[in-house]
Image (cartoon, rainbow, N blue to C red):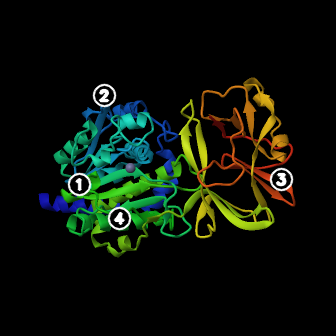
Amino acid sequence: MKTLLLVLTIIISETIMSQNYDFEQNLYQSYDRYKESSLTHRRFKHADIIPLIDKLKHKNGFTVKVVGKSVEGRELKLITIGKGKTKIFMWSQMHGDEPTATAALFDIFNFINDPANKEFCSALFDRVTLYFLPMVNPDGAERFKRRNFYDIDLNRDASRLQCPEAIILKTVFDSLKADFGFNLHDQSHRYSVGNSFRTATISFLAPAYNYEKDFNDVRGNAVKLIGNMFNSLSQFIPGHIAKYSDEYEPRAFGDNFQKWGTSTILIESGGWKDDPEKQFIRKINFIALLSAFKSIAEESYVNTSSDIYESIPFNDKYIFDVILRNLTVKDGKKQIKIDIGINLDEFEGPNEKKIFYRSQVDDLGDLSTFFAYKDYDFEGYTIERASVYEKKVYALNKLEKIDFYDLYSKGYSTILVKELPDEKFTRLPINLALKNRIDTTINIGESANFVIKKDGKIKFIVINGFLHKVEKERKFSGNGLIIK
Ligand SMILES: [Zn+2]
């Protein structure tokens, strides 16, 4: 009788988990209901997530345990839920400036706590137990930087284990001996899916466990599960899924965890157009992980062909932030046609919620095999280096009244000021300098400050990589450089 009951329970839960609606579509449609509303951008800190974790202590089914402290004493907490025999361990943000998946984990906690998902979750937790270790590198997150307090890359400390955060991760791993592991990171938004004109929004990897990149059952299961996740996500981000470099790295956690018997999957959150804070990619992480839990619980990955994994293109680098195409440069009587590839590197302003960018010309010439988040065709236009307005030296308290249209239409990207503010950037759409040190040619490695002309008249100006149409009555907002 007991056996019969057990069989019945399994049959019932099977149907609960594989109801006929599209699970992932449903997650996609209902996501806003679960999105943790206190996390709204990428620069949240340890202090922002601790209250959210502590709230879970009072929720049915969750246990929260302090498993150690970072160099600066920030607590790392392991969150557990489920009573199934298949163990799934996931850890996020061992690189402090890679928070996208951390936010998604809190969305998943909200999903689990929502009464609407009770049946699904109870069936899930009969089969699997979930272990979450969010924000492995809180000291790095505090400064929004990759490495930990000692400036050590924790993902190169899996073997030597010199940092407390690495020791904690290894100790938790050893205590669990999980069946599946999810290693959650962010990658550059400038990776493309192979040489396609598409951003690598999510990149997967089943890390190699030796230099020969052999496959065994442990790695094979990770490969199959990635096949399932690839299929699940392709309906939302078709063509935007890539594979991370599969070179064996003996100092990295993912590679070692694979070697030590946990089927390990690396998920890298990359780039998506018009999503600089990666909130859409966070939603994709939410779907990817829940979809993976379901595949594991149902063992539906078992029959998935490894061909899917094999067919995923590797990350490549065919993306710029900005490309200005088909511009004519005049050199005396000679004319040449160029494309200009510009990248924008991100910096935190004095107020951490305001982000600034520093532009750099990274390539010149024929960039027809590349693409950009902002891609402009300037066929028929000429380009010159913008110049410095030297007839006046401005007092800092007079800057707000500047007529930018007037300066732009005369080709000026930079003004002189009496003293430089003690910052690197200005919210004004113009660069500030003490004296004219700006070159007049267009060179790789320099910031992007240009005028773009048609029939001898200035139509556009580029200030620190940002393109402005030069029109009267236009409101210009900006991200100027303070040139020291
Ligand atoms: Zn990383």
Report which residue position mark 4 lands on: 226
Q: In which quarter of the image is residue 444?
A: bottom right
The answer to whether residue 61 of the structure is visible from this angle is no
**Marks 1 and 4, Cα distance to the nearest angstrom?**
17 Å
Report which residue position mark 2 lands on: 73
> Which residue is drawn at the image coordinates 43% and 70% (left, top)?
313
> Which residue is drawn at the image coordinates 43% and 53% (left, top)?
285
Do residues under tags 3 and 4 come within 8 Å of each other at their CB atoms?
A: no
Three-letter amino acid code at the position of disc 2: Gly
**Marks 3 and 1, Cα distance to the nearest angstrom?**
58 Å
Residue 26 as seen in the image, left or right of residue 337: left
In what quadrant of the picture does the C terminus appear? top right
> Camera-side residue: 327 or 302?
327
Task: Tell me residue 416's x, y (percent).
Answer: 74, 33
Report which residue position mark 3 lands on: 458
Do residues under tags 3 and 1 come within 8 Å of each other at their CB atoms?
A: no
Mark 1 vs mark 4: give the one in front.
1
Three-letter amino acid code at the position of disc 4: Ile
- The label shown at residue 257 is 1
N-terminal of the two: label 3 or label 4? Answer: 4
Residue 302 as seen in the image, left or right of residue 318: left
Mark 3 vs mark 4: give the one in front.
3
N-terminal of the two: label 1 or label 4? Answer: 4
N-terminal of the two: label 1 or label 2? Answer: 2
Task: Tell me residue 380's x, y (percent).
Answer: 80, 66
